Image (cartoon, helix red, strand yellow):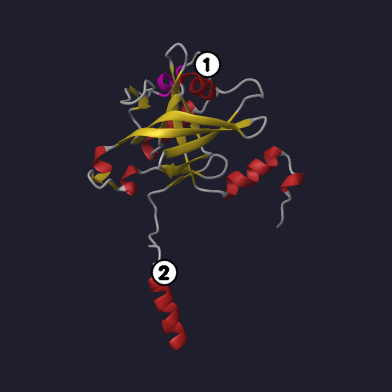
Amino acid sequence: MYFDFSSLDPQRRYKLLSATVTPRPIAWVSSIGADGQPNAAPFSFFNVFGEDPATVGFAINHRSSVDRKDTGENIRHQQEFVVNLVSEDTLRQMNISAIEFGPETNELAEAGLTPAPSTAIRTPSIAESRVALECRLMQIVKLGPMRSLILGEVLAMHIRDNAVLDRENCLIDTPRLEIIGRMQAHTYIRTADTLRMPTIPLEEWEARRKTSQDG
């Protein structure tokens, strides 16, 4: 079935994109306001985009064209944030932090979460998260009247000790992190259920093809 995006309103485009580009990792972003109060909110339009510099990005949807979400305002003013990843044991708390609380509300306190001091920035991470990426704002790209892309450089990363196989070689037991991914609507997936398929070297592929042709 064919969908012409030029004839669809943004909500219908969102439904198609969010139901098919899955699973998506969740950026559980912690930030701090001008008064020093911590904030936490989840965003599932998120991914990593490079390693030199180490770059992550997530898209934030504004409440209106002039009233930005607390996270966007905090990052714009503080120039930093932490991306915490969501594991199965923190899914319920992440869902609480997604409630549209007012700017005076401490989402970490509402969800029973513990702020943990960062090493490279002022913004705290979420202690219950198994992975936290301390980020410095690189730029904010306006994508349209209601959404912006926030890009950050990762300055430091914290990973739960039992998932680190070899610190020197940066080998991580990813399934042990039990990271949750976002599907469509209010559906999530356990990303620990994996399939392994190594990339085929060109030389091996050419040898296979030659064997097939000779046979």
Which part of the image, by quadrant, shows the N terminus?
Answer: bottom right
- Specify the segment rendered in magenta: 106-111
Quarter assignment of residue 167: top left
In what quadrant of the picture does the C terminus appear? bottom left
Q: Nearer the viewer, residue 141 or 4?
A: 141
Between 43 and 92, the one lying in front of the other is: 43
Residue 35 rendering spot, x and y as whole percentages: 45, 11
Question: Few, some or many C-alpha atoms within 10 Å of disc 2 (few <14, some 14-19, many ≥20)?
Answer: few
Rendered view: 3 above or below 177 = below
Q: Position of residue 112 (x, y in %)?
A: 38, 23
Q: Residues within 10 Å of mark 1 (few under 14, many from 20)?
A: few
On the image, which quarter does residue 117 sit in? Answer: top left
The residue labelled by disc 1 is 103
Q: Is 23 one of the magenta-colored residues?
A: no
Left or right side of 147 for 31: left
- When the figure is inspected, residue 84 is found, relative to residue 37, above or below; the finding is below
Q: Which numbered disc, 1 or 2, marks the residue closer to the eye?
A: 2
SS at circle 2: helix
Residue positioned 45% across, 83% down in the render? 212
